[in-house]
Image: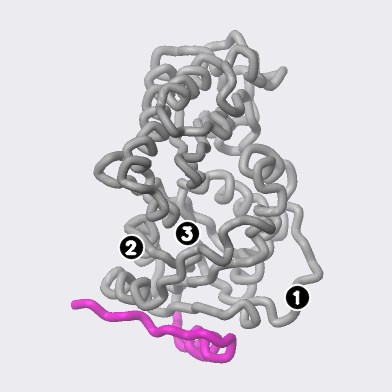
Amino acid sequence: MTRKPLLTHTRDEFTTARAALSGRTALVMTMGALHEGHLQLVREAHKVADHVIVTIFVNPTQFAPGEDYEAYPRTLAADMQALAGVGADLVWAPRVEDMYITAPHITIDPGPVAHSLEGSTRPTHFAGVALVVTKALNIIRPSVALFGEKDAQQLAVIRSVVADLDIPVEIIGVPIVRDTDAVALSSRNQYLTQEQRVHARALSRSLRVGQQKARTGAGVHEIVQAAHQVLLAEESVDVDYVALVEETTFRVLCRVQGNESADENMTVVKDSHEGVCFDQLEGHRAHSADGLYRLLVAARVGSTRLIDNCLLG
């Protein structure tokens, strides 16, 4: 039986409804335009908490001038319908003035994890994410918060902020949800034409090639180069970067940017032992305690910028 969660807008409406929820609470933060990936976050949240709270808020502080803040899809009625039956109890869809009662004077620098890759492309983005997530966690005070691994660097930023600021919440990452053609689900996929959607499959295909290279014991530069070549070979795909990072620290071990040849454009971190095989990295980098690494890609397909990633190790 489906049941729509309670929808609130103002802070007073939300705090009154929040006070009625007892026990362990889980938070899923979204910007709306919900798809199956968001709904999976809610399902997973319901497994670890008595009540699930969902926020729907297009956060202006994480958009730079000229980005798609105004055009970002806002589909609240459809979002509420989608949430029916997946375990959400309460939705907070604040207006900007409800989240930011006054214009924010404080900024949060999330540190080194936020300054490369997506942080280089969108230098103010993660400061805005850190600010809105910190505000939401302080207002809502959930026991646990769940975020998708598709935005892997964002997840790393949030974990870093929560740890450094001693915010009492458990952060859980939820694996990427993919469509039947292996394209990672994203609200921005709706901007793709049918033809562009076909080209977008190259992102997940490049990751699979990188994974295959890793399993053969290839060097980090070979893994990145192989993934990059898949993207270069695909029509209408404009590469931003391909990178291999440590999962725990998000330290970049190797990256290539743009559509130039990887041989001319590759950066390998000096202490990452360029010639070393991927399966030997853990021994050379003892502080990567979990032994996991992540391969990331970012590219424009037409005018739509897409990101994707996968674990290695």
Near mark 1 (Cα within 10 A), the count class, few <14, some 14-19 or many ≥20, is few
In this rendering, the label closer to the viewer, 2 or 1: 1
Asked if disc 3 and disc 1 are in contact, CB closer than 8 Å, the reply is no
Q: Secondary structure at mark 2?
A: helix
Residue labelled with disc 3: 146
Going 76% across and 72% down the picture, which residue do you hit?
104
Answer above or below: position of 222 versus 127.
Answer: above
Rounded to the nearest whole Å, what is the CA distance between mark 2 and mark 3? 10 Å
N-term mark: 2 or 1 = 2
Residue labelled with disc 2: 43
Residue labelled with disc 1: 103
Answer above or below: position of 1 versus 212.
Answer: below
Q: Secondary structure at mark 3?
A: strand
* Residue 28 can be seen in this image: no
Going 66% across and 53% down the picture, which residue do you hit?
126
Near mark 3 (Cα within 10 A), the count class, few <14, some 14-19 or many ≥20, is some
Q: Which quadrant would the N terminus be assigned to in this image?
A: bottom left
Amino acid at dot 2 = Arg
Residue 269 included in the magenta stretch of the image: no
Residue 291 - label: none
Place of residue 74 in the rendered image (x, y in percent of width and height, measured from the top left): 46, 70
Going 60% across and 8% down the picture, which residue do you hit?
275
N-term mark: 3 or 1 = 1
Left or right: 128, with 58 as reference point: right
Amino acid at dot 1 = Ala
Q: Secondary structure at mark 1?
A: loop
Q: Which quadrant would the C terminus be assigned to in this image?
A: top left
Place of residue 294 in the rendered image (x, y in percent of width and height, measured from the top left): 51, 33
Place of residue 297 in the rendered image (x, y in percent of width and height, measured from the top left): 50, 34
Asked if disc 2 and disc 3 are in contact, CB closer than 8 Å, the reply is no
Amino acid at dot 3 = Leu
